[in-house]
Image (spheres, rainbow, N blue to C red):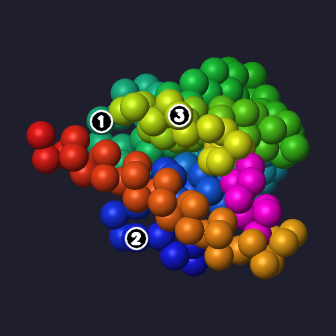
Amino acid sequence: MQQFLKSTSTYFSLSCINLVTIETFIDFKKLQLLGQLCRLPCRHLSKSVFVHRLVSFMNGDKQCVGFIPDIYKLLDKYQLVGYILTFLKDALFPSKSVWRAILRQHVLQSNIQTMKQELMHNGNEWLSPNVVGTSRVSNLWSICRNSPSLSPVCRKLLRIVALFISRKLTRQCQK
């Protein structure tokens, strides 16, 4: 889509079009599902099964595999364990809109920080946020959209930057 070379850094490509990694997207969706399960009325069988398995896992059931341990690892990864502990203790969980805002703050911000670190380390400090930002589409793509006649120039500039970053990464891997 962006016509970058195959060796282009994934983080660079994603940051150019303001997308998150697939891992982050899946984490976000799993945690959204957790919110839906926690907010289900008690009369639903799926809520009863979920709570039973969650309590078993929290009580040290080592045979527990699948969704519950996976979700707990994600909660720990994004420092959200307190919400599930509150749910178990008081049966309280944030509303859908509040939970989504919490996930955006913790999960998506974590992704943005990781992308910034990956893009800016290894001597890439020169890479200006005006060229590649982690919270919006690259200014060069915005210029392409607004001035289609400049599109070839903008594409070429992004490819050159991508090539420079990729060569630097390739050199480091070969050391």
Quadrant including the C terminus:
top left
Q: Secondary structure at mark 3?
A: loop
Looking at the rendered structure, the secondary structure element under dot 2 is: loop
Asked if residue 132 lies left or right of residue 60, the reply is right
Specify start and end residues of the magenta stretch as a single range: 136-144
Is 45 placed above or below 91 here? Answer: below
- Give the residue drawn at x 36%, y 33%: 122
Quick one: 92 or 15, which is closer to the camera? Answer: 15
Disc number placed over residue 126 in the picture, else none: 3
Image spot of residue 49 (x, y percent): 57, 51
Q: Earlier in the sequence, mark 1 or mark 3?
A: 1
Q: At 63% from the left edge and 21% from the top edge, which residue is drawn?
A: 82
* Residue 74 image offset from top left, x and y in percent: 51, 38
Q: Residue furthest left?
A: 175
N-term mark: 2 or 3: 2
Q: Which mark is residue 5?
A: 2
Q: Which residue is mark 1?
A: 62
Foreground: 121 or 152? 152
Q: Amino acid at mark 3?
A: Trp
Report the amino acid beneath label 1: Lys
Q: How many neighbours does mark 3 have within 10 angstroms: few (below 14), some (14-19), or many (20 or more)?
A: few
Residue drawn at (36%, 70%) of the image: 6
Q: Describe the element under mark 1 as helix, strand or loop.
A: loop
Amino acid type, residue under disc 2 in the picture = Leu
Q: Is residue 139 magenta?
A: yes
Residue neighbourhood size for the residue with mark 1, other residues' Cα within 10 Å, grouped as few (<14), some (14–19), many (≥20): few
Residue 174 belongs to magenta span: no
